[in-house]
Amino acid sequence: MRKIAIAVSLSIFIGFLIATAFLIHPFGYPPSEMDDYIIENTQSETGANNAVTAVIFDYRGFDTLGEATILFTAVTGVVMLFRAKKKREK
Amino acid sequence: MMSKIVRTMASFLILFVLIYGLYIIMHGHSTPGGGFQGGAVVASGVALLIVAFGSHSIHRSLLERRLSILISIGLLIFIGLAFGGMAKTFFYNFLVGSPIFGHIPPSGPNPGEMSSGGVIPIMDIGVGLNVAGGLSAILLVMALATTVMEVEE
Amino acid sequence: MTQGIPFNVPFLAVAALIGIAFYIIVSQRNLIKLVMGLSILASGVNLFLITLGYREGGVAPIYTHAPAGIMVLPVPQALTLTSIVIAVACLALMLSMVVHIYRHTGSTDSEKSRIMKG
């Protein structure tokens, strides 16, 4: 029963994925209004030559803030998990 | 703890790995690279040291407490610079156009021109410290924990 | 269409990766294999973002020594960079939790260990 449910739901899901792969824009020609603006104005607005770094730290700084917070939380979690184990051994 | 050849080569190579990582962090605004990539390279240098010397002898000089200080300093630099542009908006690049760091390069390909992206290099340093310290702490703690488990069994 | 690569093959590769990852996640019971499935899922998402931003004949969006021509989209590359670091951090957290579950219950089977039942 469980295997049948897994097979049915997975085949529906993968069917959607493959259909999306054919219905999406052709590979190599993406819609790009926002990115064209960023490529045009990176140097005059941020003074940086690297558009990717300009996007990370300037246009989308909130993403990087969240990412740094996630990394901090993960490090705190890993250190906490293994430190508790070490104390119990002694 | 590996053999003596590996240890000698690791202590020789770690200099180049660290300098390469710092180069990638510092030149993130004008060449391929940035804080994340350079931090990952530095953390891979720490991984090389852990593999060569064993996690216990590394842990004698590289405590995760000091690495967490590194992470906190990086985050504070990042958030402080984000609040620095608070006069306009959060994450406003307030150094572009100022007389010190504000030189705006001419548009288009410009080799030889100094492109200082305002707050972007300083944020690179902060995020580089954050990622390098974080990944090094993760590697060190997990290597230590698994070594303890091997000794138990 | 592109000359070298017909029929959106990179998107099909993305679909294959994500499909394999979901198959692993719903069918396996070993926690290590579940973590492997989540890692493959993260790789699929990274590949999807990179293929989404590719432009035919584009160069990297860095102006310092850029050859003449169009550039690929910078925003998906930035999101991929963020995604890679998040995937590594979450992978470390998941693996350390698996190590703890193994030490407490003596097995990595998600149905044998009592605390994972539900």
Image: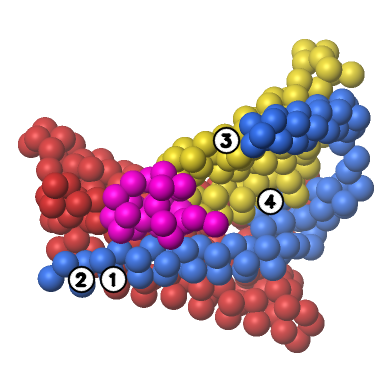
Q: Is residue A38 left or right of residue B61?
A: right
Residue named by callout 1: A84
Confirm or deny contact between disc 2 and disc 1 (CB under 8 A).
Answer: yes
Q: Residue, x 30% and y 64% (percent of image)?
A: A82
Residue named by callout 3: C27
Give the magenta part as a residue range: C93-118
Q: Quadrant of the N terminus of chain B?
A: top left
Q: Colour of chain A?
A: blue
Q: Colour of chain B?
A: red
Question: Which subunit holds the residue at mark 3?
Answer: C
Confirm or deny contact between disc 1 and disc 4 (CB under 8 A).
Answer: no
**Closest to the observer, A79 or B100:** A79
Hey, what amino acid is under mark 3?
Ser
Residue A79 in picture, x, y percent from top left:
35, 66
Q: Is residue B117 left or right of residue B87?
A: left
Label 2 and label 4: CA atoms lie apart by 41 Å
